[in-house]
Amino acid sequence: MIAPDTVPVRSDVGFAEEESGVVILMPRYPTFAGRLMGKLLHRSTHVRLKLDSLGSAVWRLIDGRRDVRQIGEQINSVFGDVAEPVYPRLVEFLNILLRNKFVKLTELCEVSNVD
């Protein structure tokens, strides 16, 4: 389970902003041999994953500074009842992004003064 104070950070994955929302570009062929075969067969090198408006909003809020609680609050204030239940849906979406290595999770750390 992803804790509310967990901070999601985007991985080095390609993405594009389009009128319809965010499109994540996932490499189609992870191996060298696969990429070579893709080029020989004239296949695109990436799969385009189009996010809906809610997923696009979450993606934009993942900046490495906001924790899950803050992202959920923002989504709730923008989308209201459409996003309900906010936190179970947000956690599930983050789990999907995590499984596909589109995001990494870090714990929120507070810096304290050491005298």
Image: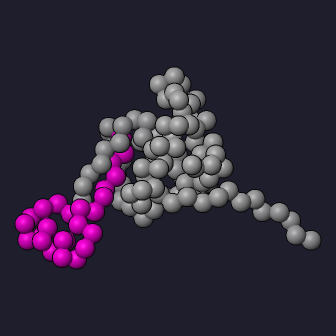
Outermost residue on the bottom side: it is: 32
| Colour setting | one colour
The C terminus lies in which quarter of the figure?
Answer: bottom right
Q: Is residue 55 left or right of residue 39?
A: right
Q: Is residue 106 above or below residue 91?
A: below
Outermost residue on the right side: it is: 115
Residue placed most toward the observer, 37 or 50: 37
Q: Give the residue displayed 38% in from the left and 57% down from the top.
A: 100
Q: Is residue 43 left or right of residue 111?
A: left
Asked if residue 63 lies in the magenta stretch, the reply is no
Outermost residue on the top side: it is: 81
Where does the magenta region start and end?
21-45
Q: x and y percent of residue 45 in the render?
A: 21, 63
Q: Is residue 50 left or right of residue 6?
A: left
Q: x and y percent of residue 97 in the render?
A: 43, 52
Q: Give the residue displayed 55% in from the left and 58% down from the top.
A: 105
Q: x and y percent of residue 86 in the render?
A: 54, 33
Q: Give the residue displayed 28% in from the left and 63% down from the top.
A: 27
Q: Examine the rendering and report whether any part of residue 51 can be seen.
A: yes
Q: Is residue 58 above or below residue 104?
A: above
Residue placed most toward the observer, 105 or 66: 105
